[in-house]
Image: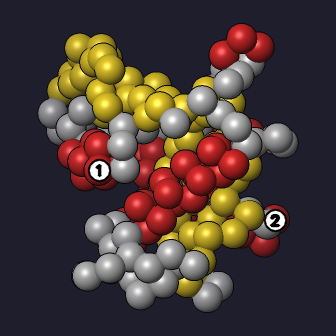
């Protein structure tokens, strides 16, 4: 369990994804991707396409943040690249709109960092953090990530136009 602190959910349980979670996970993935503000996924992606990219095969891991039976958010983590790049982890996080700002993303990110450290990864890299996703950028910085580069105009936001994508890294 993860306590989220002031203004947050009193406790969030992070557990491994189970098949029964998919309908709720799909709802979150669909919502986040169709917003087109924080993820580089195709907003027209089908449920099957979403499942193929979100459910991480072993040795990676997909988890859910739950409050009882309700899925509040989800994360996937694994090696950033195969072969000579496999010593660096990566992760992605999605939180239901009505659960944002309440500690769910923090709990998921801490879980991913702990998972990667426990498996001997040298660090964690995020390849495409939308620079205007201020809540995520601030959270990642608080948890030890640095912006190591920004690709200008690499993300097409429907509300802001072309904005940058940060590459962020946390060395363990």
The residue identified by callout 2 is 19
- Please tell me whether residue 91 is drawn above or below residue 112 in the rendered image: above
Q: Position of residue 24 (x, y in %)?
A: 62, 68
Q: Position of residue 169 (x, y in %)?
A: 42, 29
Q: Residues within 10 Å of mark 1 (few under 14, many from 20)?
A: few
Determine the image quadrant of residue 149.
top left
- Please tell me whether residue 79 is drawn above or below residue 164 in the rendered image: below
Image depth: mark 1 or mark 2 in front: 1
Determine the image quadrant of residue 15.
bottom right
Q: Is mark 2 on a helix, strand or loop?
A: helix
Residue 44 vs residue 152, the one in the foreground? 152
Whether residue 93 is visible:
yes
The residue located at (74%, 64%) in the rendering is 16
The residue identified by callout 1 is 142
Determine the image quadrant of residue 36.
top left
The residue located at (29%, 43%) in the rendering is 141
The residue located at (62%, 70%) in the rendering is 14
């Amino acid at each position: 369990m993860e306590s989220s602190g002031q203004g947050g959910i009193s406790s969030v349980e992070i557990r491994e994804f189970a098949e029964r979670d998919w309908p709720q996970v799909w709802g979150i993935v669909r919502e986040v991707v169709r917003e087109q503000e924080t993820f580089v996924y195709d907003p027209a992606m089908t449920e099957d396409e979403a499942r193929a990219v979100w459910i991480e095969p072993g040795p990676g891991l997909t988890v859910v943040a739950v409050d009882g039976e309700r899925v509040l958010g989800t994360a996937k983590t694994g090696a950033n690249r195969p072969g000579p790049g496999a010593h660096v982890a990566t992760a992605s996080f999605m939180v239901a709109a009505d659960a944002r700002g309440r500690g769910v993303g923090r709990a998921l990110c801490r879980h991913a960092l702990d998972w990667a450290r426990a498996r001997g990864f040298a660090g964690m890299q995020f390849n495409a953090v939308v620079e205007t996703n201020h809540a995520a950028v601030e959270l990642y910085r608080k948890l030890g990530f640095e912006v190591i580069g920004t690709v200008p105009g690499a993300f097409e936001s429907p509300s802001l136009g072309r904005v940058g994508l940060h590459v962020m890294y946390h060395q363990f």
